[in-house]
Image (spheres, helix red, strand yellow):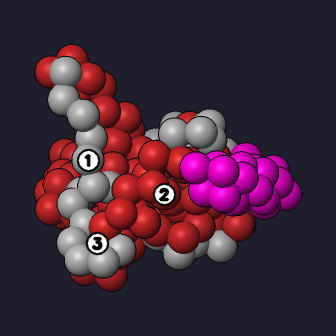
């Protein structure tokens, strides 16, 4: 991996690390994306795109002391933002791809997620979708673990209110 201010040469070590992360973290990234967009098929496609983009950008990676995984989740966040931007330009609505009895509950939860801030949605997606610790989510978001826990608590409180009243 590159040191701070390192060269922009493609490093086999970084590419190998990204490939290893694909093998061990793909499902975690896909769950994170799913919790953000609500469609598992699209989430799997976008999760694959995360790793393709990481490989294409591996020469730009600079080791800042944070795990490479944090960089991968930042890419995932950017891809989710791009996804919503493209959908809004086309006038599409984002719908859940849930089946069975839980579909209505999931739709209500997805709708309730609109009541929390984007940062709170990201915290919930990282903590519960990607099953990260507060510390890991804080690294991805560039925040302190305490701030992540506070955002998570506020988001859950808001979701409970909305789900109870809705």
Secondary structure of the residue carrying tag 1 is loop
Of helix, strand and loop, which mostly describes the magenta segment? helix
Q: Is residue 25 magenta?
A: no
The answer to which image quadrant residue 30 occupies is bottom left
Instruction: Determine the residue positioned at 21% across, 72% down.
Output: 99
Name the quarter where the N terminus is drawn. Answer: bottom left
Query: Cα distance, mark 1 to mark 3?
Result: 23 Å
Relative height, residue 127 to residue 43 (above, below): below
Q: Which callout, 1 or 3, points to the residue nearer the camera?
A: 1
Q: Marks 1 and 2, Cα distance to the nearest angstrom?
A: 12 Å
Q: Which residue is mark 2?
A: 109
Horizontal arrangement in the rendering, residue 141 relative to residue 145 (left or right): left
Query: Percent position (x, y) of residue 113?
Result: 53, 47
Residue occupying image coordinates x 45% and y 55%: 108
Q: Disc 1 marks which residue? A: 95
Crowd tier of the residue under label 2, counting other residues whose Cα lies within 10 Å: few below 14, some 14–19, many 20 or above: some
Asked if residue 162 lies in the magenta stretch, the reply is yes
Query: What is the secondary structure assignment of the residue under circle 3?
Result: helix
The single residue placed furthest to the front in the displayed view is: 165
Dot 1 or dot 3, earlier in sequence: 3
Spatial CA span between label 3 and label 2: 24 Å
Residue found farthest to the top = 89
Crowdedness near tag 3: few (<14), some (14–19) or many (≥20) residues, C-alpha within 10 Å:
some
Residue 128 visible in this rendered orientation of the protein = yes
- Residue 24 pos. (x, y %): 33, 81
Q: Which disc, if any, is residue 26?
A: 3
Where does the magenta region start and end?
Answer: 143-166
First-in-chain label (1 vs 2): 1
């Amino acid at each position: 991996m590159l040191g701070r201010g390192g060269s922009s040469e493609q490093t086999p070590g970084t590419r190998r690390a990204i490939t290893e992360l694909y093998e061990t973290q793909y499902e975690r990234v896909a769950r994170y994306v799913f919790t953000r967009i609500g469609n598992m098929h699209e989430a799997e496609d976008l999760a694959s795109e995360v790793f393709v983009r990481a490989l294409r950008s591996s020469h730009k990676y600079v080791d800042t002391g944070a795990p490479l995984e944090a960089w991968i989740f930042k890419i995932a966040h950017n891809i989710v933002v791009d996804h919503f931007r493209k959908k809004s330009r086309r006038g599409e609505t984002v719908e859940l791809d849930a089946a069975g009895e839980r579909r209505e509950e999931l739709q209500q939860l997805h709708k309730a997620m609109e009541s929390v801030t984007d940062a709170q949605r990201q915290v919930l997606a990282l903590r519960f979708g990607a099953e990260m610790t507060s510390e890991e989510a804080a690294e991805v978001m560039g925040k302190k673990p305490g701030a992540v826990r506070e955002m998570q608590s506020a988001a859950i409180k808001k979701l409970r209110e909305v789900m109870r009243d809705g």
